Amino acid sequence: MSTPLFAYTLRLADDALVLGHRLSEWTSRAPTLEEEMALANIALDLIGQARVLYSYAGEVEGRGRSEDDLAYFRDEAAFGNLLVNELPNGDFAFTVVRQALVSAFMLPYWTALTASRDATLAAIAAKAEKEVSYHLRHAAEWLVRLGDGTDESRRRSIAALDELWPWTGEMFEMPDDERALAEAGIAVDRAALKAEWSRTVDTILEEATLDRPRDGWMQTGGRRGVHTEHLGSMLAVMQSLARAHPGATW
Amino acid sequence: MEPAISSTEAAAPVSPAVPAGVAGAAADERRARAWAAAAGVVDPEIPVLSIADLGVLRDIRFDEAGRVEAVITPTYSGCPAMNMIAVEIETALDAAGFPGARVTTVLSPAWSTDLMTEAGRRALAGYGIAPPVGRAGGRRALFGETAVACPHCGSPETERISEFGSTACKALYRCRACREPFDYFKCI
């Protein structure tokens, strides 16, 4: 039976896995060797977070599903990740802007979750919080370099910011089952983090000499399993090995 | 993916269970021997640093059947060295006369570089890796660099090349004085 705690933990895991997989796609394609290591390291942190979250979700569900079952043997509509995390990497500016916007949200999110009444989620959050603080610094420093850089890097940063902005509203959306968990002191009220996120983003954009896009219509749907056309093809690649060789370990 | 962390253990209390019927002194001696065996395992990426010095080995305890259980905590969520460390602990315990040893992973309290021993910090510097500067815990500033002394020549004139180095736990620096690049063990 799908309990709210299971669904919630699974969504957190999906967020981490999908973004982690996207970042791993930069391996062998990043602009510099140092940057390649950085993006792979961040991907590793996110996939590590996904693993503990999937394992815990499997325990909460109690049907014997492992982390691999949940990562590799669910289809697109069963994924509850944020849409912004599944968008293709685009150019380097797009990846940097996304990392800045998402990490600026995840840092206060994990910090708040360390106070969860669920001891396992609180423990996972305490580790993730330390990791994401580095992710945010890394993205913020790059965004300053790109936004306040050459004409070309600035043009690409502005384009990425404009393109990504309508996907940021979903971060603050509370599914009904999550709201009940937040009231019980287990989950976090996402909307309450908006002010802190805004302050962090404004600080970075100011340093990067970029204008904050105006809030307008926001695209949502990921939490309900309604995804962009990009998630299906990403999962097809990510899941193909496990599905071709079920039960294989490596 | 390898079998992951058992998250039911995420907040397991850290308390050694002494097998019933074993005299206290003998149990202490046995635990100390098992601890020494497990503590001899080194980080595969940093072979001068034992998992005890690193703060990864958290506890040694015995179950009712008298089998030893080593409790470890991961440095980073996705650190790929943890699987290898677990296998090496089992092997080391087996060789020390503790067959059937188990390794359990706990997440809480979260690992921090504050757990690294002084001996570990000195070993790191001697190996050419700058040890973590300062204490973890405070909220990190969004911008700005940590002043890290060069582990080769000791000069404070260093600069960060990348926040992320060859492994999750390290950043990449360069010394402006002796011109050598070096790893810095990040403070978390």
Image: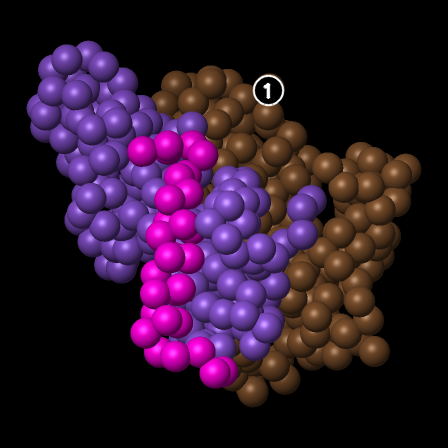
Of all chains in the rendering, the one displayed in purple is: B
Q: Position of residue B108 (x, y in %)?
A: 44, 67
Does residue A205 appear left or right of residue A234 in this picture? left
- Point 65% across, 58% down: residue: A13
Front one among B135 and A221: B135
Check disc 1 and give the amino acid type.
Answer: Arg
Dot 1, crowdedness within 10 Å: few (<14), some or many (≥20)? few
Residue span colored magenta: B20-48
- Position of A125 relative to B184 (above/below): below
The total number of labels drawn is: 1
Front one among A243 and B145: A243
- Point 80% across, 55% down: residue: A69
**Which quadrant would the C terminus of chain A be assigned to in this image?**
top right
- Point 59% across, 20% down: residue: A29
The quarter holding residue A180 reads bottom right
Where disc 1 sits, the SS reads loop
Residue for badge 1: A29
Front one among B50 and A141: B50
Magenta-drawn stretch contains A236: no
Find the residue positioned furthest to the bottom: A184
Q: Chain of mark 1?
A: A
Colour of the chain lettered A: brown
Front one among A209 and B37: B37
Magenta-drawn stretch contains B47: yes
Decide if residue A190 is in sight here.
no
Give the colour scheme shown.
by chain
Q: Position of residue A47 (x, y in %)?
A: 60, 46
- Point 37% across, 71% down: residue: B26
**Which quadrant would the N terminus of chain A be assigned to in this image?**
bottom right
